């Protein structure tokens, strides 16, 4: 058999990178291609070079080669991760954090904190190093959702300086304003005080090396949101909404805030929470109490991804109140919905890091 590089690249042009949804040739993921006799050797970059991804891609490449060249060939593929654009670990604030994900909602009561907690625990279950900042200053809920109401963070000394040591639960490092106030104490702060407190959670805490930092933002669009985009480069935003119109109108504002030219944070997608009600005794039945597919249609309208449709199930609320996120309940409807969300967020982050440059912090302009 004698084949040219052009023929090999033509065959590889039919191989689709599973996360990026484009062929590996046009993405420039085929490196160091050499042909010696009937042996084809090259390096193939993948957004997520885990074992099952390598195996699937190897089978796909072999199928395309066999279809074009028959059985008379050998191949050797060296897999490696895609080289990311820019190095987030060079930043001054949170230097050891690879991906910073903001979880936001246009209005309160849509389950944003529940989504954040389950996303964090789900990523930790996959083996990632995860941190979580509860930035909902006036209504912190992460101490409850992680069973940390009776816990306070301690100080830790690093490089001769004292830092706040985040509290760890279910493999997630957590810091919340709720750790520093009494459970029944109202936080009555002006915007400048809230902003100062958030900066302390960012700069005065020892987060170490993390794959993901999740930020549970307060509802709406205000001082806290601006503090984050002006302080750290956010990798991407996840918007949480319920299906009814009053929530969707505010979710649209949340998406548009991150998409503004002077903010320009990539929106990874929308999570539709309370998408339908499923009673325990009728697990196959779906009742669309708040309307059907509202966030799904909004995602299509705004050209962003629908990351998950989370059902309205009593056990999700009970799990949050008990401090054990629902994703830990193996083989349940709620756990499967959250696991799908985690997989989709993971995929969208990989895609975003390959196709887009690092986010820049918002520059403060004064007149």
Image: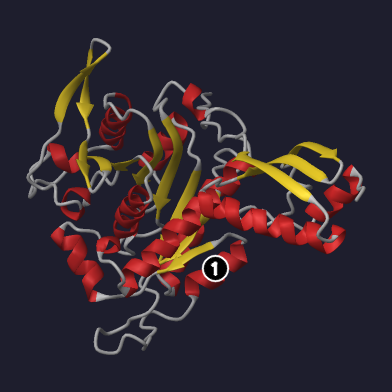
Residue 279: x %, y % from top left: 27, 85
Q: Label 1: few (<14), some or many (≥20) within 10 Å?
A: many
| Near-viewer residue (208 or 44) | 44
Q: Position of residue 292 (x, y in %)?
A: 46, 81
Colour mode of the rendering: secondary structure
**Residue 157's quadrant in the figure?**
top left
Rendered position, 115 above or below 194 = below
Q: Quadrant of residue 156?
A: top left
Residue hosting label 1: 298
Res 139 visible: no
User: Which of 325/235 is in front?
Assistant: 325
Locate residue 122, reporting x and y percent: 35, 54
Seen at 32% across and 25% down, the residue is 203
- The answer, for residue 339, to whether it is visible in the render is yes
Q: Residue furthest top?
A: 160
**Residue sitting at x 48%, y 61%:** 270
């Amino acid at each position: 058999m004698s084949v040219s590089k052009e023929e090999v690249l033509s065959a590889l042009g039919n191989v689709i990178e599973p996360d990026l949804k484009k062929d590996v040739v046009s993405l420039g993921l085929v490196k160091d291609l050499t042909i010696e006799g009937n042996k084809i050797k090259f390096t193939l970059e993948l957004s997520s070079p885990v074992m099952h991804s390598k195996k699937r891609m190897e089978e796909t490449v072999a199928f395309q080669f066999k279809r074009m060249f028959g059985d008379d060939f050998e191949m050797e593929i060296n897999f490696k991760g895609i080289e990311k654009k820019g190095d987030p670990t060079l930043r001054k604030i949170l230097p050891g954090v690879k991906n910073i994900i903001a979880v936001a909602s246009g209005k309160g009561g849509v389950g944003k904190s529940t989504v954040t907690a389950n996303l964090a625990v789900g990523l930790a279950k996959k083996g990632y190093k995860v941190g979580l900042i509860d930035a909902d200053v006036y209504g912190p809920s992460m101490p409850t959702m992680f069973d940390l109401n009776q816990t306070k963070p301690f100080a830790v000394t690093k490089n001769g300086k004292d830092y706040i040591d985040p509290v760890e639960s279910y493999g997630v490092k957590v810091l919340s304003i709720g750790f520093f106030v009494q459970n029944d104490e109202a936080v009555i702060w002006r915007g400048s005080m809230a902003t100062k407190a958030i900066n302390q959670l960012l700069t005065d805490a020892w987060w170490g090396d993390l794959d993901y930092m999740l930020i549970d933002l307060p509802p709406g669009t205000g001082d806290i949101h601006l503090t984050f985009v002006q302080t750290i480069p956010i990798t991407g935003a996840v918007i949480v909404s319920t299906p009814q119109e009053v929530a969707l109108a505010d979710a649209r504002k949340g998406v548009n805030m991150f998409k503004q030219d002077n903010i320009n944070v990539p929106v990874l997608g929308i999570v539709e929470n309370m998408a339908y009600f499923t009673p325990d005794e009728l697990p196959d039945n779906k009742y669309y109490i708040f309307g059907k597919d509202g966030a799904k249609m909004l995602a299509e309208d705004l050209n962003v991804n629908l990351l998950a449709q989370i059902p309205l199930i009593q056990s999700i609320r009970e799990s949050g109140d008990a401090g054990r996120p629902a994703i830990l309940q193996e083989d349940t409807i709620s756990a499967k919905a959250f696991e799908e969300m985690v997989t989709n967020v993971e995929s969208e982050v990989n895609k975003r890091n390959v196709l887009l440059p690092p986010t820049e912090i918002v520059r403060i302009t004064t007149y």
